[in-house]
Image: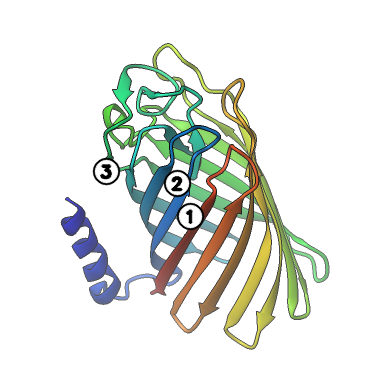
């Protein structure tokens, strides 16, 4: 399954014909590792495949991830990995309901698909650009194996970006409403980002900042991470990466990732 998935990604990146202005294809690799305040270290790997379309004032992106984790003590919701709050078990594959799964097993496979959308609300000649954010997650992952939550999630929020010459400020805030699954119900939670960055020449950029989220269940730790990012944007092609360090038990201890995209 893994070889087939990676082969499809390679073919799409190299052979997909030019078909629509504003269409792009992105593939990434994200790795995290941490104990989330427990005595077990969990290593998670995500390979997201994203197809997006950008217009003058809006954009849409559909992401289909391949997910793997060494032990089933974390859940993946809203594009973020959380400790499930249940020592030694994971509930319903999503940490929030249904059957219990042996955490000594490593599992991998298709995760939950998601749709992200944004719409420009305010774009002044000077001042920050404000965007409305939308989010929807479909339960395409196998919740028996801990690869999905087994429920629909939705959310929304706002983002702001301010260019200051070679520098820029960027931030976002979203409310995520996880779906219910079985006997346990996750709480609504918030996720947010705040960063400052700099353009270096025409194509290269760097940024650093904080990212976090409130816990989606009672007694859980809020997530908080310091994240550094960089990227290179060319004509119809780009790549980049990030490194993170967790500052709370709600976040992995360390993590990093790379991505590459092609526009059509």
Helix, strand or loop at disc 1?
strand
Eye-nearest disc, 3 or 1: 3
Q: Viewer-proximal residue, 128 or 122?
A: 128
Distance between the alpha carbons at the discs numbered 2 and 3: 21 Å
Task: Where is residue 37? Give x, y as percent.
Answer: 55, 34
Q: Please report the residue visible at 29 percent of the width from the left and 71 percent of the height from the top.
A: 13
For residue 107, which numbered disc appears in the image? none
Q: Please report the residue visible at 24 percent of the width from the left and 69 percent of the height from the top.
A: 10
List the residue tagged with mark 3. 108
Distance between the alpha carbons at the discs numbered 1 and 2: 7 Å
Compare marks 2 and 3 and give the one earlier in the sequence.
3
Q: Please report the residue visible at 53 percent of the width from the left and 45 percent of the height from the top.
A: 252
Task: Where is residue 26? Give x, y as percent.
Answer: 39, 65
Q: Is residue 100 above or below residue 248?
A: above
Task: Where is residue 143? Give x, y as percent.
Answer: 31, 29
Helix, strand or loop at disc 2?
strand
> Tags 3 and 1 in contact by the CB under 8 Å rule?
no
Q: Quadrant of the C terminus?
A: bottom left
Q: Is residue 32 visible?
A: yes
Eye-nearest disc, 2 or 3: 3
List the residue tagged with mark 2. 115
Check the image and name the residue furthest to the front: 39
Task: Give left or right: position of 55 versus 205.
Answer: left
Helix, strand or loop at disc 3?
strand
Q: Residues within 10 Å of mark 2 (few under 14, many from 20)?
A: some
List the residue tagged with mark 1. 60
Compare marks 1 and 2 and give the one earlier in the sequence.
1
Number of numbered tags placed on the structure image: 3
Q: Quadrant of residue 175?
A: top right
Task: Give left or right: position of 234 versus 139.
Answer: right
């Amino acid at each position: 399954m893994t070889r087939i998935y990676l082969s499809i990604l390679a073919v799409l990146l190299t052979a997909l014909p030019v078909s629509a202005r504003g269409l792009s294809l992105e593939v990434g690799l994200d790795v995290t590792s941490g104990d989330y305040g427990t005595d077990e270290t969990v290593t998670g790997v995500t390979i997201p495949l994203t197809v997006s379309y950008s217009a003058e004032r809006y954009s849409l992106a559909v992401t289909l991830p391949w997910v793997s984790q060494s032990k089933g003590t974390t859940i993946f919701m809203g594009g973020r990995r959380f400790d499930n709050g249940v020592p030694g078990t994971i509930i319903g594959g999503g940490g929030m309901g249904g059957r219990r799964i042996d955490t000594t097993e490593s599992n991998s496979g298709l995760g939950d698909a998601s749709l992200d959308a944004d719409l420009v609300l305010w774009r002044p000649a000077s001042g920050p650009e404000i965007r409305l954010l939308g989010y929807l997650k479909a339960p395409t992952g196998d919740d028996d194996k801990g690869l999905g939550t087994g429920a629909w999630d939705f959310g929304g929020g706002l983002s702001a970006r301010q260019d200051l010459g070679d520098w820029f400020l960027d931030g976002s805030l979203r409310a995520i409403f996880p779906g219910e699954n079985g006997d346990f119900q996750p709480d609504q939670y918030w996720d947010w980002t705040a960063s400052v960055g700099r353009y270096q020449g025409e194509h290269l950029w760097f940024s650093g900042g904080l990212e976090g989220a409130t816990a989606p269940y009672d007694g859980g730790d809020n997530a908080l991470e310091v994240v550094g990012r960089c990227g290179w944007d060319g004509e119809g092609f780009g790549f980049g990466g990030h490194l993170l360090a967790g500052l709370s038990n709600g976040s992995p201890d360390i993590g990093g990732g790379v991505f590459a995209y092609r526009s059509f």
